[in-house]
Image (cartoon, coloured by chain):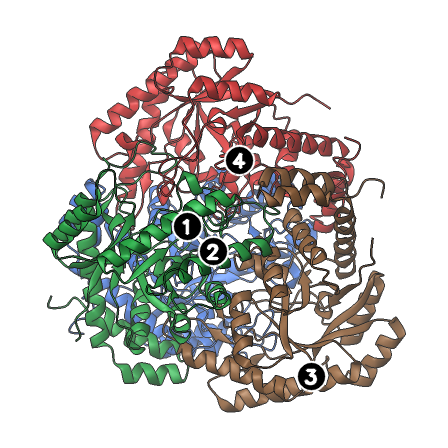
Chain colours: A blue, B brown, C green, D red
Amino acid sequence: MTEIEFGAGLWNFATYLDRYATDGYGEPRSTLAQIDLAARVGDIRWVDLNFPFTDGVTLDDVKAKLAETGIKAIGITPDIYLREHMKGAFTNPDPAKRASAMTRMNDAANVVRELGAKYVKIWPGQDGFDYPFQVDYKELNRLAVEGMRELASGHPDLKFVIEYKPREPRTHMYWGSAAKTILGIQQMGVDNVGVLLDFGHALFGGEAPAESAQLLIDHGLLWGMDVNDNYRGWDDDMMVGSIHMVEIFEYFHVLKKNGWEGVWNLDQFPFREDAVENARLSIRFLKAVHRALDLLDEDALAAAQAKQDALGAQKVVQEALLQSMAGQ
Amino acid sequence: MTEIEFGAGLWNFATYLDRYATDGYGEPRSTLAQIDLAARVGDIRWVDLNFPFTDGVTLDDVKAKLAETGIKAIGITPDIYLREHMKGAFTNPDPAKRASAMTRMNDAANVVRELGAKYVKIWPGQDGFDYPFQVDYKELNRLAVEGMRELASGHPDLKFVIEYKPREPRTHMYWGSAAKTILGIQQMGVDNVGVLLDFGHALFGGEAPAESAQLLIDHGLLWGMDVNDNYRGWDDDMMVGSIHMVEIFEYFHVLKKNGWEGVWNLDQFPFREDAVENARLSIRFLKAVHRALDLLDEDALAAAQAKQDALGAQKVVQEALLQSMAGQ
Amino acid sequence: MTEIEFGAGLWNFATYLDRYATDGYGEPRSTLAQIDLAARVGDIRWVDLNFPFTDGVTLDDVKAKLAETGIKAIGITPDIYLREHMKGAFTNPDPAKRASAMTRMNDAANVVRELGAKYVKIWPGQDGFDYPFQVDYKELNRLAVEGMRELASGHPDLKFVIEYKPREPRTHMYWGSAAKTILGIQQMGVDNVGVLLDFGHALFGGEAPAESAQLLIDHGLLWGMDVNDNYRGWDDDMMVGSIHMVEIFEYFHVLKKNGWEGVWNLDQFPFREDAVENARLSIRFLKAVHRALDLLDEDALAAAQAKQDALGAQKVVQEALLQSMAGQ
Amino acid sequence: MTEIEFGAGLWNFATYLDRYATDGYGEPRSTLAQIDLAARVGDIRWVDLNFPFTDGVTLDDVKAKLAETGIKAIGITPDIYLREHMKGAFTNPDPAKRASAMTRMNDAANVVRELGAKYVKIWPGQDGFDYPFQVDYKELNRLAVEGMRELASGHPDLKFVIEYKPREPRTHMYWGSAAKTILGIQQMGVDNVGVLLDFGHALFGGEAPAESAQLLIDHGLLWGMDVNDNYRGWDDDMMVGSIHMVEIFEYFHVLKKNGWEGVWNLDQFPFREDAVENARLSIRFLKAVHRALDLLDEDALAAAQAKQDALGAQKVVQEALLQSMAGQ
């Protein structure tokens, strides 16, 4: 059994608000306080940090806190989905807004360098549209692809990952599926842009997450991943394994089979839950999944898959998964 | 052609935030500024007001502003979905939180009296659950029903309407469908609780909104309604008619057929749009629907429906709807 | 650990066709051959039989086969969704079609008497509508309720259960949700009509199946149930536990907590799978669920639910479920 | 106003069955009878024919009937989704089944030559999977792509179009989205495979159909299209315009803007409706859409889209659409 490394988006340890609870589900927490909470979980070795940091927190502060806690930065996620870019970052119709988004992302790239992180994570949640007839799709595509190309070309020493999602906060996000994101990256013609696959986004988008993982791996583009869970109709960012035990197990099985070695990264929004306990339980479940991978009768599974035998596959899967906590 | 009266939830004229654009899609607006915007639309005669009003705005201020603009209060919607009640208002596991929600709603009831509004609107968005096994459903039901009974019983001179919705911000709202809400109201055994039917909530919940309207009317419980639109998978609160032209037309046809006379109330969240223009276009569309109702060949439709003849019905419907703007 | 009794809709052992594979996913099987397959599973004690039986099979044949295999009839499901009733059974606009459906159901009632089954199961899959404006909802409701009242009143010695489902083959089924079905049964004013809750139908309809079970129990109407699984967007009738392990576990927990004692009945369509193996694996999983119910720390769960503590509940649930096959 | 040419899948004029109404929604109709019905519609110039033809109908019969009615073959759709290929055509785990599917498709290619049709339409509805863990995704991809390459390479004089769809009859179809299909076609490395875009499949798959049209056009792959409507959750194949008037209008607007000139092809399943009337009403609506395209203020729309102004766009769209039947 190989070791897994666990990580988390730092926002797992923030507090949240939404369009109803406008005063927030808790007191705001600083970037440093969030890192402290991440450290309290006990298994988290990596964090993906929102940038800019919360008010008054400097890069040196963050460096010091990471050093203190022994946590490393896996990625930096620039905030390009706030009011300034509510009509888009790359695809904003206003060139000045596109420019300010580019500045923000260039700054984030520098932080990646400073912290020695693995990637700049681009999640352009406001890039897309809401209504039929609102946009010229050809132009939207041009802006999305050219902007990303410009960004990546400016930092050939760094890696960028796009995190796709079908929708929210837009009713339609431009980078909406695994396959469409691959097509866009091809159009860019650069070699330092890949994909961060969020299990829940794939599920929400009607994809089989394990199939999307294989597709991205086959295109050499699976450069990062996040896990969580949801009810398929929305990006609920719930505790991993709380709903889709079998499909998350299959997802990790595909990663293992392909020799994919990367951080198992949490992306959850515990609106009303304790953030540390939420992460701990998630990791406890992921460890059970990891054990189940070792319990899995790979030969029997391969034999079933060769015949596309759904029942044969279910049998070995249930045997492994449903005893993954025995003796723990 | 009878006159229609238009109204709007005052939040149509607010600004919004969500879990990503945490700095909001615009500068906050006071209750008074929101009423001014409602007045600028030109056709809005009624507003449903969030309570408490925004900081520093008194009841007298609101009375004066309503008098100045000639707009009346149709309802008051107490804020029982903020941080204080993030785990529920009626169904919060903490009795102190339930008590503070009750106080808030009793205060709202007094404002209804003061403003001569038609109803206290109860939207308990945080009453429900997120995860499997999180709640004891029997207990959840008890709390939801007993709390509402207590509230309504305390104000026998007033009307209360429950606005159901399948989910958001909870993954499962307790008052989640038309039929379940009727069952709950029956259990209460009071006669001053009815339903506010939001067209988009019914659509989102997999209901045929026109069928839900009929169901509520047949139970004597359709006491208010809101209109908007969405893509069925979420409560997008988009401009009415932007997606579901035929189904909104059917919805108003059912209301007309039953002699339902009430305010045509907007419930839309123009996150990135101009609030006044959003309301104006919505009302323009609703007037087209109103004309289409008069253009509709009712005899032909009734004949088609007697045979459950889908094509015959579509024919007369398209004829009416697709010429509803001619000559305007 | 109490004994569970397993059953199955006999159609679990049929072959199927659909609108594409019009020549069927296998050779047709007679009612008797289906019972033989059910018997081969080894744990099935009850079957729900489609009526009429397949060509040439008599009631005496069925009696003999049941006696031979030691299987009992739990219910009879009259075919009221074939070509003759493609526009509805109870709600067909043609009185002659309604009459022929009634005859078919009365005949099924007699078979229930003859076989000593527990109920006549009514699944009016063609009762509903497809298009907006196609039906007068008030009239649809009248026909659905009056027809069911007439049927049930004619057989006061028998029990009838309605199996609701949101859609398919209609885009909208009249008996579409747990709550709406309860309302319809209330309107009937009879005491021999209850509900058969299909886990997958509830899931497909956006209900939390465990909550629907509690709702039906609280109304004294949960008289039967079926289990299976799906991806929430359709009634896929897949192997139970293949997708929603946690929610099916919660469902059975609610049944146990309420002292509900009835048959655990399979309702699956193994289009491309071996029917016997499909049932065996399903039952194997259900036995694991049953063990998990005994492993569950009920006190800890109750304590978590009293606080609506999602994480606390998940913890004890995962501990029980994820070791339910250890040592088996 | 340019002329439009209308066509229809010949199955619009067939009768259907499904897993419940196993005796079918009407008496079976021969290929020739279906062509006669298509001719009765009055506007249909093209048909896409299922192959093999119904029992006893020869190619010469079909040629004669087409000549008699003045209707041309736009495409041939080989039946590769019947019992023989219930586990897949290209991706069937059994090489013998893959071979028989290939034979069937080669035969269809010859019919395309004989009839001078525009394309062989490939709809591999059984290629995919149903359960998690059932298939090795890499192998599924290999079989799907290599098989299609082999087929197309064998007929360099012909065009092939793949019709993608997210699911049904499989819970997951391999060719499931526009973008994924483009990726697969790229992998084939042939130049005679394109895409047939079905409006309803795109909608069902969570795509904005107009955006998918633009994406396919930009890749030079939009070689055919079908229209219909649905409720987004399933491929209901309803009358075009019955639900999504605005989005179908946008779809045709994108086609027009790109100078796409091809047949407006119906793909509808009037299970319980009159097939001829169903097609007539659909074409009547499509003609209204065509008029609306001419009524549309293109400059105002372009100005709105340049600003991504949803409201401005809605305004001109509603003006055009809602008077498209005036004076007709």
- The three-letter code of the residue at mark 1 reads Met
Q: Give the crowd class for mark 3: few <14, some 14-19, many >=20 residues within 10 Å.
A: many
- Helix, strand or loop at label 4? It is loop
The answer for how far apart the CA atoms under marks 3 and 1 are is 53 Å
Give the spatial CA distance, label 4 vs label 3: 52 Å
x and y percent of residue A69 in the render?
37, 77
Earlier in the chain: of badge 1 and badge 2, it is 1
Residue type pointed to by label 2: Gly
Proximity of marks 4 and 1: CB atoms separated by less than 8 Å? no
Q: From mark 4 to mark 2, how far is it between C-alphas? A: 25 Å
Q: What element carries label 1?
A: helix
Residue D45 drawn at (x, y percent):
57, 18
> Circle 3 is placed at which residue position?
B108
Q: CA–CA distance between discs 2 and 3?
A: 45 Å
**Left or right for D282, reference B87:** right
Q: In this view, does A206 lie above or below A327?
A: above
Q: Which amino acid does label 4 sit on?
A: Glu
Above or below A313: residue B147: below
Q: Distance between the residues labelled 4 and 1?
A: 24 Å
Is the residue under label 1 in contact with that under label 3 (CB below 8 Å)? no
